Amino acid sequence: MIEDALRSNWKSLFSYALRLTDNPDAAADLVQSCALKALGSAGARPRPEAVRAWLFKIVRNAWIDNYRRNRHIHDEPENRVVEEGPGFDHRYDDSIIAEITVRQALRQIPPDHREIIELVDLAGFSYGEVASILGVPQGTIMSRLSRARQALLAVIERENLRPLQARRRHAR
């Protein structure tokens, strides 16, 4: 059961870990750590319907532990290059532009806002599952998600809506 859950959720776990760490190597380490902990926990196995949320909680707790251990090293990179695959042509694809905009905005909101959006909107967990992962009441999840979405929209609006500057004065 745990092995199947790990296989079917590996990509989502990695995506979540990557959003937490902003580092592919650290994300891979977190997912590996999650797999080791999940496979090694004989007594703490959850109900089959809760395994996915349990795996995400393991990743989150491992990230928190790593963050606390390495607090002085945990700096946000200032400039990051978006990796593009072969044949990638972003010039005319609004969905790619929207995805890049949201990714950039996610980096600018507080980590607790980023985390709640990742779990609900990107990983697809229910409010109840996220409440279990974060260890807070379900009502708290709904209010945090609302604030997080507002913060994300504020960043997107602030970063993308700029008045056009006049390049020349009107001829008289």
Image (cartoon, rainbow, N blue to C red):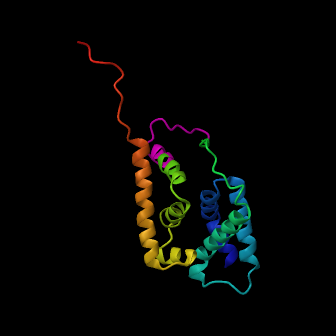
The structure residue drawn at horizontal position 53% and vertical position 64%, both measured from the top left corner, is 112
Residue 62 x %, y %: 69, 69
Q: Quadrant of the C terminus?
A: top left
The foreground one among 147 and 9 is 147
Specify whether residue 124 is painted magenta: no
The structure residue drawn at horizontal position 45% and vertical position 62%, both measured from the top left corner, is 148
Residue 78 x %, y %: 61, 44
Residue 23 x %, y %: 67, 53
The foreground one among 7 and 14 is 14
Residue 110 x %, y %: 53, 58
**Extreme-left residue of the structure:** 172
Specify whether residue 93 is painted magenta: yes
Stretch in magenta: 86-100
**Extreme-bottom residue of the structure:** 43
Look at the image and tell me whether residue 121 can be seen.
yes
Q: Quadrant of the N terminus?
A: bottom right
Q: Is residue 125 left or right of residue 75?
A: left
How many numbered badges does the structure rendering display?
Answer: 0
Answer with the quarter of the image where residue 33 lies: bottom right
Look at the image and tell me whether residue 31 can be seen.
no
**Extreme-front residue of the structure:** 72
Q: Is residue 90 above or below residue 117?
A: above
Answer with the quarter of the image where residue 152 lies: bottom left
**Extreme-top residue of the structure:** 172
Answer with the quarter of the image where residue 139 lies: bottom left
The structure residue drawn at horizontal position 41% and vertical position 53%, both measured from the top left corner, is 153
